[in-house]
Image (cartoon, grey):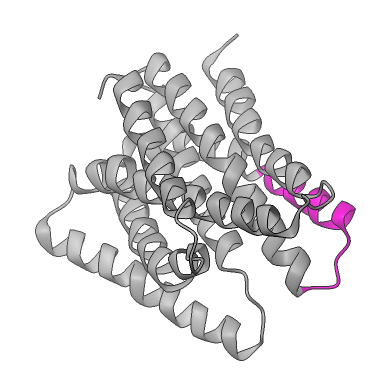
Amino acid sequence: MNDLAQIIVLTLIAGLAIPMGASIAAVERIRPRWLEIEVRHSVIAFGGGALLAAVALVLVPEGVSNLSSLLVFVCFFGGGLIFMMLDIRLAASDTPLSQLTAMLSDFVPEALALGATFAFSRDAGVLLAGIIALQNVPEGFNAFREIKDSTHYSRLQIIGAFTLMALLGPIAGATGYFILSGYPQVISCIMLFAAGGILYIIFQDIAPQSKLKNHWAPPLGAVAGFLLGVLGQEWAGV
């Protein structure tokens, strides 16, 4: 199997983890009610931890490696600023899509990086695909619950839309491989922009949702999610 075929397969598998997480979330609610609430908040926290790991261990380290301090500042702060403006716009239209926005902001830049990485190291690309897939499951779970609770869309419609979103992986991966692998500065800018935006979303929307009064298990979800990223970095040998 040539490089392009491997990139398409790996990024598609990583992307399909999104509807997989959504399918798990679509299962009938857990009983008793208190347990369902605690599980949901724990998964939200886990997704937040995984996103934080993506920022701290993948997006920022890769992003700063090819840019000047000025560009690092502009891209990272610009990402946070643009995502704040998007959040304000979504709030004004009463459309809470913070989980979906964070998920795609994580998935697409990492898929771009995967494609570019494949031009130099297949092993690192394969491991990065595994990390992306593991992150996408809880993120797909959280995004499904958020959309289902705030819109009129059915379960099948949401899962179907998430399945189509999985195609963004091969598109981004092929773009990174053929176009951006020769422009590491562009990939770094994209990754830092996404990192700034994700960090804003984590502390503005995701972290507050994970807090549950008189329950202490959900914060462990954030710890577990970040640990996933740490272990993923260790497995990648970075």
Choose top left, top right, bottom left or bottom right for residue 142.
bottom right
Q: Is residue 224 left or right of residue 27?
A: left
Q: In the rendered view, would you say 24 is above or below 231?
A: below
Residue for point 59% across, 81% down: 90
Q: How far from the left and from the top, in percent, is residue 150? A: 74, 74
Residue for point 75% across, 69% down: 149
The quarter of the rendered structure image containing the C terminus is top left
**Camera-nearest residue between 95 and 142:** 142
Q: In the rendered view, would you say 185 is above or below 158?
A: above
Does any portion of residue 120 appear in the rendered image? no
Q: Residue 162 in magenta?
A: yes
Residue for point 57% across, 57% down: 41
Residue farthest toward the top in the current orientation of the protein: 1
What span is colored magenta in the figure? 151-167
Residue for point 69% across, 49% down: 165
Q: Is residue 29 left or right of residue 73?
A: right
Q: How far from the left and from the top, in percent, is residue 140? A: 64, 48
Q: Residue 66 in magenta?
A: no
Q: Main secondary structure of the magenta part?
A: helix
Q: How far from the left and from the top, in percent, is residue 14? A: 59, 33
Does any portion of residue 110 appear in the rendered image? yes
